[in-house]
Amino acid sequence: MLAKKYRLQIQNWLKNKNKRIISRRSDFFIIRMSANDLFFSRFGVIISAKVSKSAVKRNRIKRIIYDFIRLNKFNEIKGNDVAITVLPAIAKLDKNEIEKELKNVITFQHIFI
C-alpha cells in the first residue's frame, strides 16, 4: 500500500478550482493530473460502485493500483497530483492485465516516463 504521504485527498483536490488539470483517457482509466509545489507526487484512485457492487473487489483493484505506483516509484517523481478514475471495463481483468494497462497509459500517454 502507498504511504499516506503520497496519497491524494480526492475530495479536497476536486474542490480546488484554481489549478490546471491535464486529462488522459484509455479504455480502463481516466487520469487527471495537476502540478503541486511538493518534492514528490501524490496519487488518488476513484472507483465507483459501477465498477463492481462488491467493496472487496473495488478495494482489491485500488490496492493493485497503489502497489503498482509504489513498486515502480512513480511517487518519487517531483511535483504532480494524479487522480486515477477506474472505468467499469476493468472488472474483467486480473492483476497482471491491470498493471499492464496502467503501465501502457502512463508511458504511452507521456504522463510519467
Image (cartoon, rainbow, N blue to C red):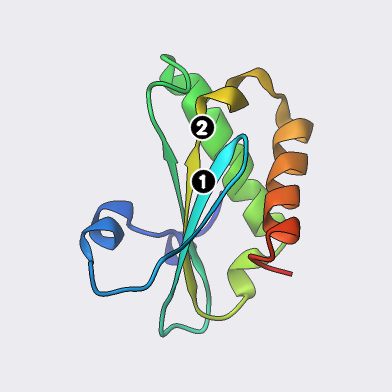
Element on which disc 1 rests? strand
Among the two numbered marks 1 and 2 on one chain, the one whose residue lies closer to the N terminus:
1
Q: Quadrant of residue 78?
A: bottom right
Residue 24, percent from left and from top: 55, 54
Dot 1 and dot 2 residues touching (CB under 8 Å): yes
- Measured along the vertical axis of the image, is residue 33 above or below residue 69? below
Mark linked to residue 11:
none
Q: Amino acid at mark 1?
A: Ile
As drawn, 66 above or below 32: above
Q: Is residue 47 shown left or right of residue 40?
A: left
Indicate whether 75 appears above or below 105. Answer: below
Is 13 placed left or right of 112 in the picture? left
Q: Is residue 45 above or below residue 18?
A: above
**How many residues crowd around disc 1 within 10 Å: few (fewer than 14), some, or many (20 or more)?**
some
* Kind of residue at badge 2: Leu
Q: Residue at x 51, y 46 (%)?
A: 30
State the residue at coordinates (21%, 59%): 15
Q: Which is more toward the observer, 64 or 81?
A: 81
Q: Which residue is mark 2?
A: 87
The residue at which mark 1 appears reads as: 30
Q: Position of residue 66 (x, y in %)?
A: 58, 48
Is residue 68 toward the left or the right of residue 8 in the image?
right
